[in-house]
Amino acid sequence: MMGQGQIRHRMLLLLVLCGSSGGVMAAAAGLKLNLQLANTRESLTNDRGDWYEQSVAVGVNRDRRQIAYVSVRETERFGLKDREAGIGAMFEAAAGATFAVDATSSETHRVLARDSVGMQLSKSLGEGWVIGGGVKRSRYPASNSVLSNLSVEQYIGSWRFAYTAYLARATGTAYSSSHRLGANYYFGDDLSAGFYAARGTELENMAGQGLRAMAVVNASANATWRITPDLSLSLDAERQKQGSFYTRRGIRIGARIGF
């Protein structure tokens, strides 16, 4: 049986091979590939261990817009490690409309979902207004969940303002809802910052307890800096109070490299 280190190495090697072999085909089709790397660490209260996450993805871009990706990530939550593979694609459904689909699968699924399938549709209404909606179904060993969302965005000058409403339900439970507000400011084409706040009831898969509905209060901020046309860095900071179970605070550092 392969160790986790061997599995991680093979997953990374597969992504590199996909990127290098796909680069020639992408260039011939007028597309461009990018490599996305991210590392996250979160600390939890109530004597719970830190959470860790590392992810690698290869994306396909057309005119600076990502149209497809494949990804792998490894997480450690509640002292349990998980591995997950993902794939996604975005399509121009009609004038001003974008349709996106994604799917994930985890062979370990100790905390992460066994698998998931999601879809999202957004539509530009003109004058800076964008509306969207989507649904995601996730399967866990002892239960399933469905998460739906509706959103509205408004672009005013260098600002973007957004509101999203979420409705979630696990098998055999009542519906729970949450709400998220966000604001982004764009300092030209190469630098942006965002601030977000969320509140409501969300589903969380707790180790040994299954899916639980918890009252959450979240605040987060991020910044993205495009250093060169082929290199950008991102930094995210987040604080989330998860009912009476714990409060977690985390930092995520990411990089996107075009080739």
Image (spheres, grey):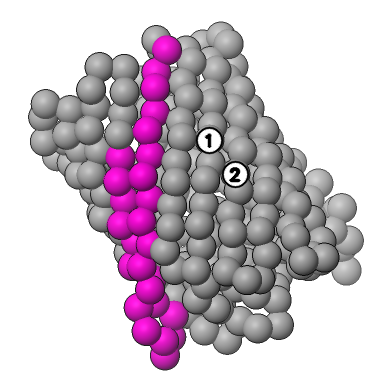
Q: Could you say which is closer to the camera, residue 230 or residue 17?
A: 230
Instruction: Classify mark 2: helix, strand or loop.
Output: strand
Crowding near pointer 1: few (<14 within 10 Å), some, many (20+)? some
Q: Residue at x 74, y 46 (%)?
A: 41
Image point (42%, 90%), residue name: 172
Residue 228 position, x and y percent, is 56, 9
What is the magenta range? 162-187
**Disc 2 versus disc 1: distance between alpha carbons?**
7 Å
The image position of residue 52, as x and y in percent, is: 75, 51
Q: Which residue is mark 2?
A: 238
Instruction: Assign the N terminus to one quadrant of the image.
Output: bottom right
Tag 2: Cα neighbours inside 10 Å, few (<14), some, or many (≥20)? Answer: some
Q: Quadrant of residue 16?
A: top right
Q: Is residue 173 magenta?
A: yes
Classify 45 as above or below 195. below
Residue at image location 52% in from the left, 84% down from the top: 143
Q: Main secondary structure of the magenta part?
A: strand
Earlier along the polypeptide chain: callout 2 or callout 1?
1
Q: Amino acid at mark 1?
A: Ala
Image quarter (top left, top right, bottom left or bottom right) of the C terminus: top right
